[in-house]
Amino acid sequence: MQPQAFIFDLDGVITDTAEFHYLAWKQIGAELGIEVDRKLNERLKGVSRMESLERVLAAAPRPLDLSAGEKEQWATQKNLLYQGLIETIRPSDRLPGIDELLKSIRNADLLLALGSASRNAKVVLERLGLAGAVDYIVDAGQIRFGKPHPETFMNAADYFGIPYEACVGVEDSAAGIEAINAAGMFSVGIGSPDALREAKYLVADTSELTLGGILEAYRGDEDCGSPFRL
Ligand code: B16
Ligand code: MG
């Protein structure tokens, strides 16, 4: 089978907003007396704002007994910091290789969707000058179960009306790869084998992504059903 659609994550795949999320959580952590390091940050990638806050709070040296209202305030505070950081985003902030990959997907007449957990996804895509580049944007506000649940990716395939196994999902987070695999789609990971060991096809960074490479791996996965790694 040939894939019919690509579903891209945004943060850490199309642009490096993953770093901005990290900086914002690091600052919130500092205010709460919690160290947010890169190891903890790996576990915040791809998961919702509130779930990220819960994971940060779970790393506190002593339990912090915050009310639901206080948690809301910290999450809002983090989002304000994040929104300040993404104001500078412009088209030149698209990650290496992404323009070429999006163009190849278009030229091959395949469908394109954005499957991000971020409620800021639309704004970021607009600032990158890519709002018109995708056929569909999954609305994170409408998703009941965030990644690693497959709903985000299934939502895009259902919108297109195509089978899940005809979709390729592209992700930088362990939660996202788990979600793609759980949907029965072909998972492409960007990052380290340590963090993304479940990816069916793995590259170290976006500059290594090519449509030809992904299609070859997709067909190889169909033929032998075993994971393909670069
Ligand atoms: P927001 P993605 C995710 O985006 C981020 O990876 C994750 O760190 C963030 O907590 C989540 O979006 C929610 O973002 O606070 O902007 O709604 O990687 O799924 O594109
Ligand atoms: Mg991501």
Image (cartoon, rainbow, N blue to C red):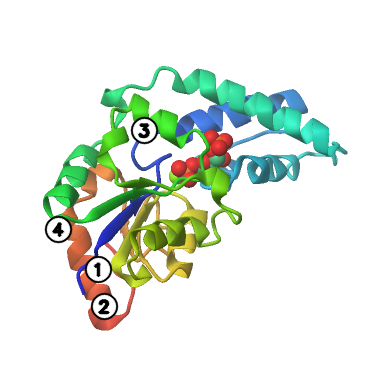
Q: Is residue 165 visible?
A: yes
Q: CA distance from mark 3 to mark 4?
A: 25 Å
Residue at 17% across, 48% down: 106
In this view, the residue in front, 43 or 154, is: 154
The C terminus sits in image quarter: bottom left
Amino acid type, label 4: Gly
Residue 100 image position (x, y, % from top left): 16, 41
Label 3 or label 1, whichever comes before in sequence order: 3
Label 2: state its secondary structure: helix
Residue linked to disc 2: 222
The vertical placement of 153 against 76, above or below, is: below
Q: Earlier in the sequence, mark 4 or mark 1?
A: 4
Q: CA distance from mark 1 to mark 2?
A: 6 Å
From the viewer's perspective, tell me whether residue 6 is left or right of residue 36. Answer: left
Q: Which residue is mark 3?
A: 125
Q: Position of residue 11 (x, y in %)?
A: 43, 39
Q: Amino acid at mark 1?
A: Tyr
Classify mark 3: residues with Cα within 10 Å, few (<14), some (14-19) or many (20+). Answer: many
Mark 2–mark 3 Cα distance, whole angstroms, equals 32 Å
> To which residue does mark 1 refer?
218
Number of residues whose C-alpha sits closer than 10 Å to that of mark 2, classed few (under 14), some (14–19) or many (20 or more): some
Secondary structure of the residue carrying numbered label 1: helix
Q: CA distance from mark 2 to mark 4?
A: 15 Å
The furthest residue to the bottom: 224
Q: Earlier in the sequence, mark 3 or mark 4?
A: 3
Contact check, label 3 and label 4, Cβ < 8 Å:
no
